[in-house]
Amino acid sequence: MANGSLITDELRKLIGVTLETIVFKVEEGAIQRYAQAIGDPNPLFNDPDFARKTKYGRLFAPPGFTGWPVKAGRLSERLLGSLAKAGAPSRLLDGGIEFEFIEPIGADDVLTATTKIANMTERETRLGKTMFTTLETTFVNQKGEVALKSRSTFILF
Amino acid sequence: MAKQIYYEDVEVGTEVTPLAKIATTRMLVQWAGASGDFNPLHYDEDFAKAMGVGAPIVHGALKRAWLGHLMTDWIGEQGKLKKLSCQYRGMDYPRKMKTMDEPRDGETWWCKGKVTKKYEEGGEHLVECEIWVENGKGEKTTPGSALGALPTRSAK
């Protein structure tokens, strides 16, 4: 590696490694509060009686909502800590996300989310020397179906 | 919700019905609570300055959720959102509050999109869209894309 690379050998070893698996329940009230925070009055996300009569059969979660707190696929303090220990910069910005919605996610679902580091790159940006870390998370529901996949990019500088 | 849109109603270039949003300091607090993202970058002036962004910024994930709202409204109850992605390219700064629940004057954000491709695959009628959030100056701070399946008028 060139001198001054942000991606140390220690960090490089983390690529492809599963960082954490978490299990959580999608609560009805959490879905409603999330929809309200977005300002989305869609009855699918707000009105359980309405939602029960639809094909979803239960309060449906707005795209990307996977239960409170939304932590799977996020760079939690713990994950950030393990990156920092391996030499990563400590300042963090959210870079973006890709979702693939496979099965509906709704109230009372129990999701198991597994997150791994998919990639690390670096380049010079207006923030200075900047590292881009991509996390891949797979969400499996209580029936064993893959319900959602996400790829999120975090900017460390 | 708006009336249901069908695959037959859509062509390449068709506009996704735009959605206006106003980010406020109050909304950011509400979003922090609802999402569980308590990063002080979004409510602490000094911390935001130290992070090099000048002042508290709108959560990228909130803008992404707005784009989700744009798409689920447009494809309707019978549509299915299959993919959504976006990049947080530009910083957005919330309006401050004038009263408990009224923002000061300032910028309005628009979530917008247009159809870039329509095709059938695996028995589904799919539309690809370019989507984005633009700020009050018309700059796309959050560009992205979406893939949705729409119902057809002549169900096969």
Image (cartoon, helix red, strand yellow):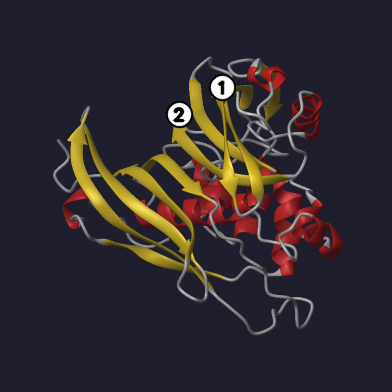
The residue nearer to you, when weighing A50 against A138, is A138
Left or right: residue A56 compared with residue B94: left
Left or right: residue B153 compared with residue A112: left
Residue shown at 62% from the left, 24% from the top: A111
> Mark 1 to mark 2: distance in Å?
9 Å
Where residue A11 appears, x then y in whole percent? 68, 22
Q: Residues within 10 Å of mark 2 (few under 14, many from 20)?
A: some
Vertically, is A73 above or below A94?
Answer: above
Res. B5 visible in picture: no
Res. A132 visible in picture: yes
Asked which secondary structure carries label 2, the reply is loop
Left or right: residue A151 compared with residue B100: left
Kindly identify which chain the residue marked by label 2 belongs to.
Answer: A
Residue occupied by mark 2: A103
Quadrant that contains the C terminus of chain B: top left
Where residue B134 appears, x then y in whole percent? 48, 66
Quadrant that contains the N terminus of chain B: bottom left
Q: Residues within 10 Å of mark 1 (few under 14, many from 20)?
A: many
Residue shown at 55% from the left, 52% from the top: B88
The residue nearer to you, when weighing B109 against A5, is A5
Residue occupied by mark 1: A141
Looking at the rendered structure, the kind of residue marked 2 is Glu
Asked which secondary structure carries label 1, the reply is loop
For the residues labelled 1 and 2, say whether their Cβ atoms are less than 8 Å apart.
yes
Count of numbered circles in the view: 2
Residue shown at 63% from the left, 15% from the top: A17
Where residue A36 appears, x then y in whole percent? 64, 57
Looking at the rendered structure, the kind of residue marked 1 is Asn
Kindly identify which chain the residue marked by label 1 belongs to.
Answer: A
